[in-house]
Image: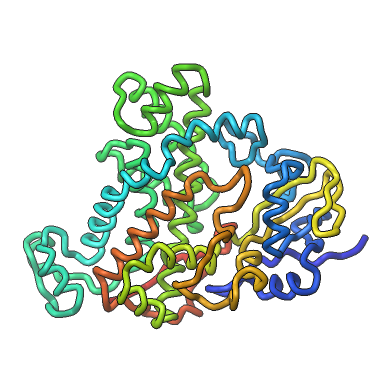
Amino acid sequence: MTAHPPLPAVRPLLDPSPEYAKWRAEEPIRRVTVWGDNSPWLVTRHEDARAVLADPRFSADATREGFPGFRPEPPPRKPGQFFMMDPPDHTRLRRVLIPDFTFRRIERLRPAIARICDELLDAMTGTAGVGAAEAGAVEAGAVEGATHAGAGVGAAHVTRADLVESYALPLPSLVTCELLGVPYEDHDFFQRQARAISTLTSGPEEMRAARQALQTYLGELLDRRTREPADDLISRLARDRVATGEVSAPEAVGIAALLLVAGHETTANMVPLAVVALLRHPEQLAALRADPGLWPGAVEELLRHQTVAHSGLRRLATEDAEVAGVRIRAGEGVIVAVQAANRDPSVFADPDELDVRRATTGHLAFGHGLHQCIGQSLARAELQVGLPALFDRLPGLRLTAPPEDFALTMSTIHGVRSLPVSW
């Protein structure tokens, strides 16, 4: 049996594993080993990546035999988890969310996202209850060791924090609370479970317990919104989908849980990576400060440059297919290395450079085809609001340790476990 190189398990902080560039140039479709004798094809060019992701002959069903999953045991099929389903189930479940992820609906969430960002920054800096002008002076370093009744009698303003713990992790879970309609009094519970699921310091038992607690809670919330509907996603699922028989109650709960887990991990990891990337490229940050109108395009460039889908998008051929002259046979796995495709020099000039003025049309950070991320508009809104809010409130933001010292998440989603900063 021919030995194939392993899929790269680690990568530098701000770049894909160096093997990807070499393979993309020399053998853009090649075999790699993920575990045992499972050796799927690895696709590294942008054109080929789009071709595979748009081709219905490549299945996303991770329960199929031979699927190049993250471990030998196939995952259990869970109600509502449409990201690992094929049509028609994928189509049926995904379409129930389309009305809640239209551009207009997400735009209506922007004021709530801005409020959440402000509240997190208030808590992080110890300026809750302080007037905006005074808070800005404190955060800029104009007031040293100041105290305010709003921050607690005798309490000094905070000038350092872990950005992951204080901002990046709670931001997407609180936004998801807003989207789903989780009551304010339950936000702390919701955040704790989200954190336990996505934080690598959690053990397997803790993660399982958190998932079960969330499933139970979301089921109870679905029942409550069936009796007392509101203007939120859970209520619309209960009223328009479960009550009509379009989806079952367990499927509705699974859909809600999927939104939390999938949306939480990606945004929570993108925020600190984007911060490090901009602090490491001060000329790019200066351009954004000079022209805030560049932020939407800058977010797209950061998504391209810092593609967090570290382990690729995985598929299984259901029938023979040819991609760029390579015959992929039915039953063979494929891994689409979107982080490599997003650095393809045939599509993006000087792809390893961060350029906030770059036209990034066609990047694959959210995938492509039938399974393109349905929550991409929400993720964009969180980043387009959350990153400027952070840099505006903390103009002196800086890292307190060299990026080389940061502990990486070492999971399927690339990121850092903590990001110590000061201002």
Residue closest to the eye, 60 or 13: 60
Residue at 43%, 65% (x, y): give it.
Answer: 297
Left-right relation of 47 to 237: right
Number of labels in the image equals 0
In the rendered view, tell whether residue 89 sits above or below residue 54. above
In the rendered view, tell whether residue 99 sits above or below residue 292. above
Residue at 43%, 41% (x, y): give it.
Answer: 101
- x and y percentages locating residue 360 in the rendered image: 53, 65
In the rendered view, tell whether residue 270 sits above or below residue 371. below
Residue at 37%, 59% (x, y): give it.
Answer: 384
Residue at 11%, 58% (x, y): give it.
Answer: 129
Q: Judge whether residue 333 can be spotted in this image.
A: yes
In the rendered view, tell whether residue 210 sits above or below residue 408. above
Left-right relation of 23 to 350: right
Q: Quadrant of the N terminus?
A: bottom right
- x and y percentages locating residue 281 in the rendered image: 43, 80
Q: Quadrant of the C terminus?
A: bottom left
Residue closest to the eye, 11 or 99: 99
Q: Judge whether residue 409 can be spotted in this image.
A: no
Left-right relation of 261 to 45: left
Residue closest to the eye, 107 or 121: 107
